[in-house]
Amino acid sequence: MTIKKPMTVTEAEKNDLAVARKVLGIEAAALEELAQSLDGDFCRAITLIEGLKGRLVITGMGKSGHIAKKVAATFASTGTPSFFVHPAEASHGDLGMIGQDDAVLALSNSGETPELSDIIAYTRRFHIPLIGMTRRAESSLGSQCDYPLVLPNSVEACPNRQAPTTSTTAMLALGDALAVALMERRGFSADDFRTFHPGGKLGQRLLRVREVMHGPDQLPTIVQTALMADALMEMTGKSFGCVGVVDDAGKLAGIVTDGDLRRHMGDDLVSRAVDTVMTRNPKAITADLLAVEALAIMNDRSITSLFVVDEHGVPCGLVHIHDLLRLGVA
């Protein structure tokens, strides 16, 4: 057995850790201040966005622009049609992308970003609702917008207090707060979320059991009065390593697995009644369950298959762990 020696930390590394913790502390304090400062303007902005017939256009310059792009992506992926418009490009024709049914969310730490002036003027001219996210309520953006979202005037976390750090963290967090509050208002579900995230790991984890299960025509089932010889034939034919046992009403009463066969192995196995070998009252799931939840049940119980039953307890499907792993649910 190899014993790991404790890793020594140099003085330079100790200083790095101290600086990192200081930065995180400053930004955490700013987020707490932001949370406490939220007021009716935040709620009115949510109401505006919720009732939009058009789209939420988000804009910002420099570091604020990078945050604006992420905020636009978050809104778009959570049910609010949204896109980013670069303020400099807006002055050269992209203002035409903003329609009468839209609203604009403009991000500017100082509230005096020159490149935003044309967008601000455009929204005022055509009566397009403007939400302003800025540190300075008295700034051009803060005073001209319809819905001011004022960030706390916390110090930037960099040593010279100049580089956007705390301010951009606050903008990002406030954008997330708007998007999540809208999700809550709309009752945005996991199914809705998967609609906007059909690809990749996230989309697979949001699959429902009904989308991955084997259907009724593929189910290995046998009646409770049958013999194990018949159960073995059904198990071999369907190749799931198990067979479901149903009662006279068609409800799932038990299951016979490879493990049950090993536990009851003997010369008389094939002539025994199924209900003397089966595991009674097996765990079953519904088709509405998330596939990732089904996988968790399998892992917890060290099993490889789960029968899916309807509201009457009648088997309607089967999900196998190999299918979930192949689909990338794990």
Image: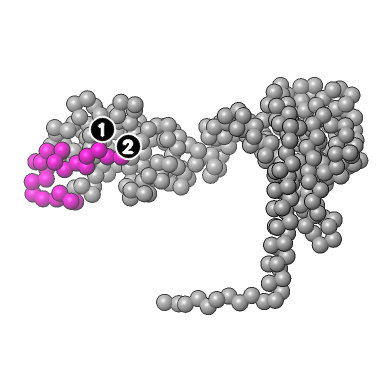
Q: How is the image coloured?
A: one colour
The answer, for residue 116, to whether it is visible in the render is no
Left or right of residue 103, residue 230 in this image = left
Element under label 1? strand
How many angstroms separate mark 2 from mark 1 (CA)? 9 Å
User: x%, y% of residue 69?
Assistant: 74, 41
Residue under circle 1?
252
**Residues drawn in magenta:** 262-283
Element under label 2? strand
Left or right of residue 319, residue 254 in this image = left
Looking at numbered disc 1 in the image, what kind of residue is underneath it? Leu
Looking at numbered disc 2 in the image, what kind of residue is underneath it? Ala
**Pointer 2 and pointer 1: residues touching (CB < 8 Å)?**
yes
Q: Dot 2: within a 10 Å radius of its alpha carbon, few (fewer than 14), some, or many (20 or more) residues?
A: some
Res. 40 image quadrant? top right
Front in this rendered view, residue 219 or 131: 131
Q: Is residue 289 above or below residue 27?
A: above
Nearer-N-terminus badge (2/1): 1
Left or right of residue 90, residue 286 in this image = left
Point 73% across, 44% down: residue: 34
- Does residue 93 belong to the magenta stretch? no
Image disc number at residue 260: none
Residue under circle 2?
284
Front in this rendered view, residue 301 or 97: 301
User: x%, y% of residue 24?
Assistant: 70, 57
Left or right of residue 138, residue 296 in this image = left
Point 36% across, 38% down: residue: 319
Q: Dot 1: within a 10 Å radius of its alpha carbon, few (fewer than 14), some, or many (20 or more) residues?
A: many
Point 78% across, 37% down: residue: 149
